[in-house]
Image (cartoon, rainbow, N blue to C red):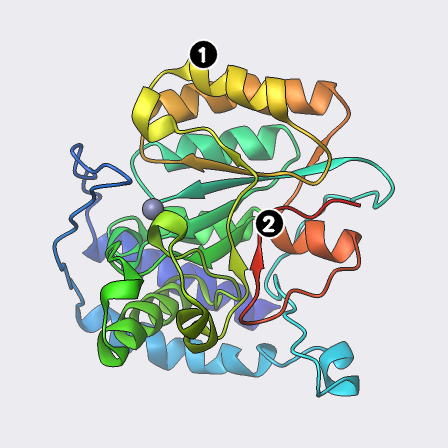
Amino acid sequence: MANRALVISLSLIMQLSIYTVQDVDANINSDTADYSMNQEYSESYDQQTDILEFETENLITTDESLKNPEIEKIKTDIKQESKREIDPNKPMIALTYDDGPSKYTKEILDLLKENNSAATFFVLGSQASKYEETVKQMIENGNQIGNHSYDHKRLTLLNDEELYDQINKTDNLIYEIAMYRPFVMRPPYGSTTEALKEKIQKPIINWSIDTRDWESRNAETITKIICENVKDGDIILMHDLYESSLEASKTVIPELINRGYQLVTISELSESREIILRAGQTYYKIYK
Ligand code: ZN
């Protein structure tokens, strides 16, 4: 544990000294996003990689997957140290936030933590590189990170090389930042084909409630859509890119808890329902 603490504090120091937080491009729209390629790697990644070598032995597959090698058991949250207890018999909801991190994400993380809850963040590699501390905080607080591509390309239009670049660059970046490798994917626009799903080699997580927050940019509208439609096992789509989505979260999170829902990650939801998430399949909800 001492070794681990040292690793974390060393990498924190490096992050703080090398990176400055930048605001996300305010014009990003989830349907029309045109993210510029932005590879701001520095030598700090090499230093981190050396340190992180010590940690790789922790990233082993679970006993369960070893016992069932034919099953692609996607065990998530290896790095989670969540103190939350989840009752599989009680209702639960998976909040998901796409396209971040952004300058609003940290506040969403604080809000979740205050409410003893967690969510799943489908992050873009290009944004993760701008908000490294936020990405680390996601995992440290017991949230889940999914891959949402590097810079929001429509994956169905890419050739194989471009596709794997979008996926692998993001996975590697998140691992370098947070020592966590995403097990689930949400392609931009939720757009896939059968061929693409096979190539992605991760469970694809879409949603059952679309708040269309990118369109309304209105906290009341977002809150209303969620509160009027929510059911046990829903996966709710929002974007941690807009202040209105943060404001809606401030109402929605306590309200859902008041109604008796546990706010859980995709992995926690699937494991509580004893559903094995399989690569190449798409999940929209996990009802009982
Ligand atoms: Zn998106």
Query: Element type at marker 1?
Result: helix
Which residue extends farthest top? 220
Residue 176 in the image: x percent, y percent? Answer: 37, 69
Mark 2 neighbour class, 10 Å CA radius: few under 14, some 14 to 19, many 20 or more: many
- Tell me the residue that label 2 is attached to: 142
Left or right of 38, for residue 267: right
Residue at horizontal 63%, vertical 46%? 285
Q: Quadrant of the N terminus?
A: bottom right
Q: Is residue 31 above or below residue 135?
A: above
* Horizontal side, residue 255 vs residue 261: left or right: left
Seen at 57% across and 65% down, the residue is: 281
Determine which residue is flagged by label 1. 220
Mark 1: amino acid: Glu
State the residue at coordinates (38%, 63%): 174
Q: Residues within 10 Å of mark 1 (few under 14, many from 20)?
A: some
Q: Are marks 2 and 1 in contact (CB under 8 Å)?
A: no
Q: Residue 76 location, x and y as percent?
A: 62, 64
Mark 2 to mark 1 CA distance (whole Å): 28 Å
Q: Residue at x 32, y 30 (%)?
A: 214
Q: Earlier in the sequence, mark 2 or mark 1?
A: 2
Label 2 sits on what residue type? Answer: Gly
Q: Is residue 28 visible?
A: yes
